[in-house]
Image: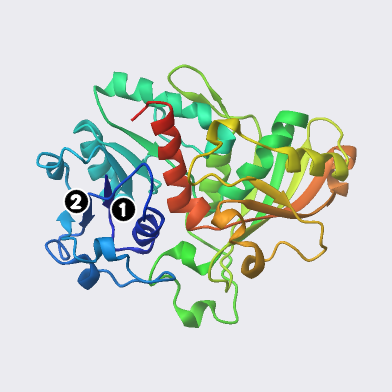
Amino acid sequence: MAVLGATGAVGQRFIQLLQDHPVFEIAALTASDRNGGKRYADAAHWVIEGDVPAAVQDMVLLPTNAGITGSRADVRVAFSALPNDSAQVAEPEFAQAGVTVFSNASFHRMVKDVPLVITEVNAGHLLLLKQQRSARGWSGGIVCNTNCTVSGPAMSLRPLYDAFGVKRVFAVSMQAESGAGYPGVPSLDITDNVLPFIKGEEDKMEAEARKLLGTLRGDYIEDAPIGLSAHCNRVPVTDGHMVTMSVELSSPASPMEAIRVLNAFHCADVDGLPMAPARPIVVRDEVDRPQPRRDRMAGKGMTTVIGRVRAEPLFGDCGVKFMTLSHNTIRGAAGGSLLNAELCARWGLI
């Protein structure tokens, strides 16, 4: 398989998570034209914890175009860490060439026939890949993972939606600096400060959550009929997006009933997959948890941690409020995309 856009922060996270993976082996790395032909260790400014894996240090970076598949029969899956403008062109070209692309870019997420998936939330939407291939004449395809901020809220809403129904959600994010990529937010902007605007994030959070919780209707996803209002903010935290959630349920539920449903949440489809956490949701009962520094690596960064579950008086007997925390570059980016690919492999979709 290939990692597209391998030198950036998300590309690096893909490479790190793919070390010694039992299903996927890195056969090709691509980069922008200015880094093409360079040795990976020379071109990549490694910004995540640990060192550049020895297996990729001497790999030569290839151009990001589907022509690389002509001489490499082992490239049938690609993990895309491309920026939006590059993903718009390159990902369909790879899909047409027979490569199934698992994309971290946002460009194709809301396209009608593209699955937008968090495996535990909406694994069945992966079957839309068959319709996509048929309609477009592709032997490959495109599968998107969600915006990194949406992963925690969507994970928390799935069990509540199934058990009680959800009418309305009011959400406020506190998003980590790494969500802006590298070099990211200038230090003079974020130090001792909160930035109350992140371009496009609020629209993505509202729209993507509805698609994730929606229903597969043959060749498209019918959005969940949920009212959702989001406020998105950048805070001086390295990794881990926190979101406060005020939820109006369709039927009454106490905080303890909500906690029971959240703690019991499980997805048998992903049992035993390498990237799947033992528990997709962990509810903390301490009054001051979750905290990014202490909880973001729960389940090796793949578990959503929820805390401060209590009654929401704005919505009476149908109201609950809580905090969610998800690791934005693992569960919300490379790790989530890798788990999508693992489940596709299990189901024979790649």
What x and y, as percent, mark residue 154? 61, 42
Q: Which sits in the foreground, 18 or 165?
A: 18
Choose top left, top right, bottom left or bottom right for residue 51: bottom left
Q: Residues within 10 Å of mark 1 (few under 14, many from 20)?
A: many
Q: Seen in the image, is 37 located left or right of residue 335?
A: left
What x and y, as percent, mark residue 282? 70, 50
Q: Could you tell me if the residues under marks 2 and 1 are in contact, i.e. CB atoms within 8 Å?
A: yes
Q: What quarter of the picture does the N terminus occupy?
A: top left
Q: For the point 86% across and 36% down, which residue is it? A: 253
Q: Do we see residue 211 in this rendering?
A: no
Q: Which sits in the foreground, 12 or 19?
A: 19
Q: Which element carries disc 1, helix, strand or loop? A: loop
What x and y, as percent, mark residue 236? 57, 74
Residue denoted by label 1: 82
Which numbered marker is on residue 64? Answer: 2
Q: Which element carries disc 2, helix, strand or loop? A: loop
